[in-house]
Amino acid sequence: MRRVAAALIVPLIAAGALAGCGSSSSSSGSANVSVGVSGKFGKAPDVQIPSKKAGEQLAIKTEIQGSGPAIKSGDAVLGNFAIYVWSGTTHKLLDSTFTSSPQVLPAQLGLPGLVRALRGQRTGSRVLAVLPPKYGYGTQGNSQVGISPTDTTVWVVDLIRAFSPTAAASGTHVSSGGGSLPAVSGASAGAPAITIPQAAPPSTLIVKTLIKGTGPGLADGQTVVAQVVGMNWRTKKVFYTTWPSAASPTGEPFSFVLGGQVIPGWNKGLVGIPAGSRVMLIVPPADGYGKAGDASAGIKATDTLVFVVDILDSVAKTA
């Protein structure tokens, strides 16, 4: 399910595709504006789609008006979403995070109609967006998840919280590491820099709190939103970061479900850590990528990894 959700929100069309796209007449889009949604925020919506062909008009409606901060340009948004495929006179539910766990919608969505629908919305809102092909997946569709070039997609999105590309831990600084452990420098409002000592790595999992947050402790099954820097102890090189960087100038926090979607060292080391914290995890091979390693990231089976994780927020599993 989460693999399908991720495939749906991978950028496919440049935002500039909106240029020159005009709305059709109200008659051709009347079916689109008649799509209805009911239900409470945070709960799976009841979506009513007419048994007729979709029109060419982009239709957007704020079904529930939130009272949180407005989403700014460049923000990633933690949310729940349900996506329907409307093909001819029939429709079907393609995917829904309402029955699993919320997920971060990236700032660079690549779906011009959805970008327009979410722009300026307040967190706590439920937004309905009916995207004809030119406002959605365009002439190529998305064959990976079964969306044809002529399909209209219907999105219902509950906006939980927005995060800027530089969102960071918000607690009290308690340590910078160092000694036999890597030292971590950098302001709490920016990407941390890791310096690994000229020594052999520890053989067991090490969890070191650098900034202590005041939020609730993390628990298995929760969706966690975080910023991360990952460095290989052997090479002393960063192999992964969510912070803005030369390789990814925009940056973007990411979300994961604790207890199953990440490596064992994270599942073990992050439980109980308060939201708002920055922690350093020193992960031996057995608690990392194991005997297989990860060749795409240059990680060997014997490599110890160092992660500095800023825990931005946590949300319980959707009921």
Image (cartoon, grey):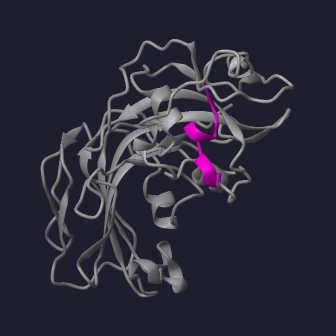
Q: Is residue 134 magenta?
A: yes
> Percent from the top left, x then y, of residue 314?
46, 38
Give the left or right position of residue 7, taking residue 93 as reference. left
Q: Is residue 142 above or below residue 119?
A: below
Q: Is residue 305 above or below residue 106?
A: below
Q: Is residue 121 magenta?
A: no
Image quadrant in which you'd find residue 60: top right
Q: Is residue 39 above or below residue 110?
A: above
User: What span is in magenta?
Assistant: 129-141
Q: Nearer the viewer, residue 115 or 178?
A: 115
Give the left or right position of residue 113, taking residue 240 as reference. right
Q: How many marks?
A: 0
Give the left or right position of residue 266, taking residue 211 as reference. right
> Percent from the top left, x then y, of residue 9?
55, 47
Q: Nearer the viewer, residue 75 or 318?
A: 75
Tell me the residue at 17%/53% (across/down).
Answer: 175
Image quadrant in which you'd find residue 180: bottom left
| Quarter of the image with the C terminus in it | top right
Tell me the residue at 42%/19% (across/down).
Answer: 122
> Percent from the top left, x then y, of residue 128?
61, 23
Tell me the residue at 60%/24% (across/down).
Answer: 24
> Percent from the top left, x then y, of residue 172?
20, 39
Tell me the residue at 21%/70% (across/down).
Answer: 181
Give the left or right position of residue 306, taking residue 54 as reference. left
